[in-house]
Amino acid sequence: MNANRSFRFYGLLALALLAMSLAPPFASAQSFKASFTLPVATRWGLATLPPGKYFVTVDSQAFPSIAVIEGEGVHVLVMASVIDGGAATGPSKLVLARSGGRARVCSLYVETFGLTFRYPPPKSGWLVAQTPELIERLPVTLGGK
């Protein structure tokens, strides 16, 4: 059963990468590149990112939407589960949930697009209901400076 989940995940990832490679060239005009700094080790998708400075690139027109995160010797691709064009306002930000000494990325709001890319908690090892969560909003600098 675990092997089926892994196969399904990697199959979806391969399909997403194929779709991105076949996308028309003008779609890249809607990409977002920015930088942010993580104050603590943070889980984003299946990866754990150490504290430090990172760069993120997101293409708003690709589906499924994949964030490319680079920095601190890490290169990660993370797929958003939901893209929301609703309630968030203000400057671009990365939203973390901290609970029980651990942190995870909940969402990335991109002011340029007016979109929030949401990332679900990991299916294992993260007991959301066990302890209260502290929500932290980190500034995201446009252009990856």
Image (cartoon, rainbow, N blue to C red):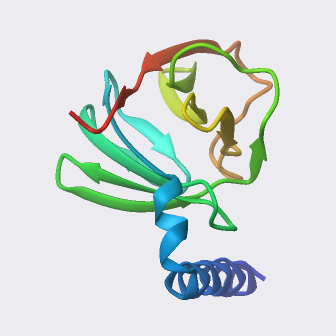
95 above or below 24? above
The answer to which of 120 and 56 lies nearer the viewer is 56
Q: Quadrant of residue 96?
A: top right
Residue 76 drawn above or below residue 34: below
Residue drawn at point x = 55 percent, y = 78 percent = 20
Above or below — where is 75 with respect to 48?
Answer: below
Q: Residue at x 34, y 25 (%)?
A: 40
Instruction: Please identify the quadrant where the C terminus is shown.
Output: top left
Residue 8 location, x and y as percent?
72, 83
Q: For this view, does 136 lie left or right of residue 88?
A: left
Please say if 128 is above or below 46: above
Residue at x 64%, y 86% (from the top left corner): 15
Q: Position of residue 67 (x, y in %)?
A: 49, 55
> If the image is split into quadrants, where does the N terminus sit?
bottom right
Q: Is residue 68 left or right of residue 115?
A: left
Viewer-nearest residue: 21 or 73: 21
Residue 77 in the image, given as x and y percentages of width and height: 46, 63
The residue depicted at 66 percent of the width and 53 percent of the height is 80
Residue 82, percent across and down? 77, 49
